Image: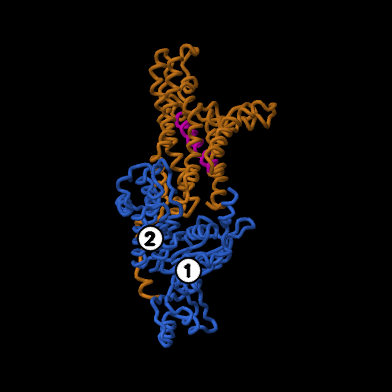
Chain colours: A orange, B blue
Amino acid sequence: MSTLETRYTHVAPDHDRLSFARVMRSEFIKITSLRSTVGLLLAIVVLGMGTSIVLGLTVKDAGLPGASSVGFMLDQVTIGTVLFGQLIAGVLGVLVISAEYSSGTIQTTLIAVPSRLAVLFAKAIVLFLTVTAAAAVALFGSWAVTYPMLATYGLEIGLTAPGVVLALVGGAVYVGFAAVLGLGIGTLLRAVAAGVATVISVILLLPIILSVIPASDVVRSIHLLSMSKAGDALTNTADGTAFSDLADGYVSPAAGFVVAAAWALAFLVIGAVRLRKKDA
Amino acid sequence: MITAEALVKRYGTKVAVDSIDFSVRPGQVTGFLGPNGAGKSTTMRMIVGLDRPTAGRVEVNGRPYHEHRAPLREVGVLLDAKAAHEGRSAYKHLLSIAATHGIGAKRVREVIGLAGLDSVAGKRVGGFSLGMGQRLGIATALLGDPATIILDEPVNGLDPEGVRWVRTLMRSLAAEGRTVLLSSHLMSEMAQTADRLIVIGRGRILADGAIGDVISGATRSTTRVRTRETERLMATIAAPGVVVSLLADGAIEITGLTAEQVAVAASAAGIVLHEVASVSGSLEEAYIALTAGEVEYQSSNIAQTGAVR
């Protein structure tokens, strides 16, 4: 080699190398630097707490239960965050990856981080943590704002009551899983519109379709093991000691956690296979 | 340094890149030329691992791209000027990429300054013109201070000042001993910037060498002469292999003799020459000659299209 060819000798210093933690940091910068993604995170909080406030204000007209119960309180507090949150989170999950394809950013991303699985898993973890955090703010916030409203009727339940904190955390984790499910679908389909339609179908439409199909044991079991049913299970308190009893129609919070995680991971894995195999 | 060996990319039955071998050396600007659909972009995408080769291998700085522990420090790439999310600011876009390698905000500000984007760094990329997008893409490529730089059509959409900036930048990066691979359809720009050329057509390499060799290999250089005694000169120099043609402006164009040979012959015969010049082919002529018949999407005859209207 001539001197010209060897003149630019460079050694990448240790502090300028790829690492998984750095890829996660990059993904965190991405998710917090777009109005759309930040807006969706805020929407989880606003719609979740807003729904609880409306429910709290109208609780008397809706019919008061005879005595205070954890289950009644949790319904008021969690329904908005879980119902709207799961859809918003699913859409956010789709956007996080499909917007990279529609904008061309995916090229830049994969040039910086050639390991595609590292990119996807970093996205999944950052997405799960930020969405779960937003949903936790929504749920604990909902509990806090409805506490005085329910107290008016002597129906307030403190955080120390058995199962309350677990149900609120469970609800937040469920919304986080819905986001990961969306990420998997978005990675698989790569298109915003198709991804959003699919994620809504999986979360909302599947249980509806199953409920109109003539009931058989199989259909009933699938229904109990659907994503949104897992959300219900996670935001309720454990009833007895059974993990789940499909014949009896019971899914415990722990079983709900497993079901929601399984749905999210299944789609994430399918997305990962496509991402790895296909040209970007 | 980029090395490709028997590199193949097939999409179904269509062969985009047909077993090409080439190397791009440090210390030079290598131009990558070819018609649309010739396989340039596919080759560049394979170099950085965006597309997987069907067969063969391509290495950057001695390794397949994905094996590098700090890819941004090895290779800086601009493939698509608009490869940034419209809703993100240029600064955050660069910061998110830099973060993957632990490159700090200081370097991000540096490349923003280098690319002349200071005034728009905080603005969202969606409002950028194509030229600003190119500058952002070049800033991205420079983030890791890489040893190898690959730019696909970097001057597309740039104003004359920007074109000149890219040219100077490429020359100085190469002068520092870096490897620079550059594709462009602007022949005059390529002629001014590149030291070497790789010309590709229908997935095959049509020419690979120093820019002067590629041009002289694909074009004929001629000698242009002007004299009052045209006919006597033509008779004097007539020989096998010498072709003389009369030009519209009265000058004659001679192929097969150098300017020196023509001048000596004329002097011996006592013929006064008013003008003697050797005319070498241009890069554009060489390119057209090389890629004739290799063009994937050829424009239809202009006269015909005119007649239809």
Is A183 within the magenta? yes
Magenta stretch, main secondary structure, is helix
Would you name the residue on which mark 1 appears? B248
Please state if B81 lies on the left or on the right of A184 as rendered: left
Relative depth, front residue between A273 and A224: A273
Would you name the residue on which mark 2 appears? B146
- Chain bearing tag 2 is B
B103 versus A189 height, above or below: below
State which region is magenta: A168-186
Is A79 within the magenta? no
First in sequence: mark 1 vs mark 2: 2
Q: Which amino acid, mark 2?
A: Pro
Relative depth, front residue between B215 and B53: B215
| Rendering quarter of residue B29 | bottom left
Residue at x 59% of width, y 30% of height: A205
Q: Which amino acid, mark 1?
A: Ala
Location of residue A48 in the rendering, given as x and y in whole percent from the top left corner = 44, 26
Residue A265 appearing in the image: no
Q: Residues within 10 Å of mark 1 (few under 14, many from 20)?
A: few
Tag 2 secondary structure: loop
Q: CA distance from mark 1 to mark 2?
A: 52 Å
Location of residue A95 in the rendering, given as x and y in whole percent from the top left corner = 48, 39
